[in-house]
Image (spheres, rainbow, N blue to C red):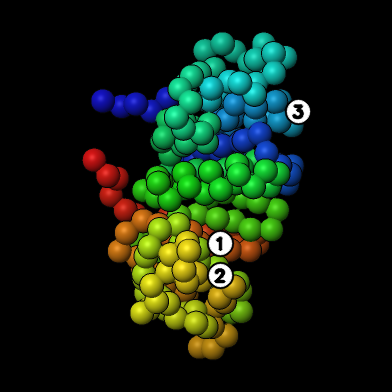
């Protein structure tokens, strides 16, 4: 049984109700051209002159003006309160790439909840775009073509270990966990130059790169080995 509300063979940009710079939205749409709004993100989409192909969420943040401006058959209300609107949207769409704009910034509790969703749905190729960073859940294996010296931060959302190549401080042999060792502010080795390779035995690691590395993150995830969905 297919529980997906919306599918696109190119890529989907999810637009949330948080901070969403116009240049971030435009770049996301250039890479993932189908726009799906998440609850109140529909108002941001309309203000940018774009009518979303679908709106997904519990609709508690969707203004009446935005609701009436969008065709009724594009509004998909999921009223349960056991998950966030980002989770509702991410689990309800299917595409080779999902880019999220408007999910980082503003309230830190919302940011943490969105990062939690990333690792719980690590089988999805989803990248969140912020003002200074791009964030995604590490797949089982990934190679990233990054500039020498570029920042690579690894933040564990569960107890996890892994292996790396091309980082100034290798992570092999390290046991990382949210309340223990973490891997932020690592960087790409200056020499010998080459791609960064990361490998993890299970979901639970966030990869945080500079905003300028979005294209490298997209290319890396496209050829990465994903985790198999649970169940």
Cα gap from disc 1 to disc 3, whole angstroms: 29 Å
Mark identifier at residue 208: 1
Name the quadrant containing residue 26: top right
Disc number lying in front (1 or 3):
1
- Label 1–label 2 contact, CB within 8 A: yes
Q: Dot 3 lies on which element? A: helix
Viewed as shown, does residue 191 lie left or right of 201?
right
- Rendered image quadrant of residue 71: top right
Q: Which of pointers 1 and 3 lies earlier in the amino acid sequence?
A: 3
Residue at image coords 68%, 47%: 105
Q: Position of residue 94 (x, y in %)?
A: 41, 35
Q: Residue furthest left?
A: 231
Front in this rendered view, residue 30 or 213: 213
Asked if 147 appears above or below 220 in the picture, the reply is below
- Residue 52: tell me if it is visible: no
Q: Which mark is residue 47?
A: 3
Residue identifier under label 2: 184
Residue at x 67% of width, y 11% of height? 68
How many neighbours does mark 1 have within 10 angstroms: few (below 14), some (14-19), or many (20 or more)?
many
Residue at horizontal 50%, vertical 54%?
136
Q: Are marks 3 and 2 in contact (CB under 8 Å)?
A: no
Mark 2 lies on a secondary structure that is strand
Front-most of residues 151 and 71: 151
Q: Quadrant of the C terminus?
A: top left
Q: Earlier in the sequence, mark 3 or mark 2?
A: 3
Distance, label 1 to label 2, CA atoms, is 8 Å
Residue 180: x %, y % from top left: 46, 68
């Amino acid at each position: 049984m297919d529980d997906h509300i919306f599918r696109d063979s190119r890529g989907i940009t999810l637009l949330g109700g948080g901070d969403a710079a116009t240049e971030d939205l435009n770049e996301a749409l250039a890479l993932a051209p189908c726009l799906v709004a998440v609850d109140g993100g529909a108002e941001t989409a309309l203000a940018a002159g774009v009518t979303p192909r679908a709106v997904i969420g519990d609709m508690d943040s969707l203004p009446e003006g935005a609701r009436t401006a969008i065709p009724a058959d594009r509004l998909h209300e999921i009223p349960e309160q056991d998950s966030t609107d980002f989770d509702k949207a991410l689990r309800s769409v299917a595409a080779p790439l999902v880019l999220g704009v408007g999910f980082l910034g503003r309230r830190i509790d919302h940011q943490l909840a969105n990062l939690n969703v990333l690792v719980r749905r690590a089988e999805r190729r989803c990248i969140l775009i912020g003002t200074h960073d791009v964030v995604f859940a590490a797949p089982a294996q990934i190679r990233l073509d990054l500039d020498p010296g570029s920042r690579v931060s690894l933040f564990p959302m569960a107890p996890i270990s892994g292996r790396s190549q091309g980082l100034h401080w290798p992570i092999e042999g390290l046991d990382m966990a949210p309340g223990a060792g973490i891997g932020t502010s690592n960087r790409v080795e200056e020499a010998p130059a080459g791609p960064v390779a990361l490998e993890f035995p299970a979901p639970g690691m966030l990869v945080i790169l500079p905003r300028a590395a979005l294209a490298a993150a997209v290319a890396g995830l496209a050829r990465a080995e994903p985790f198999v969905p649970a169940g």
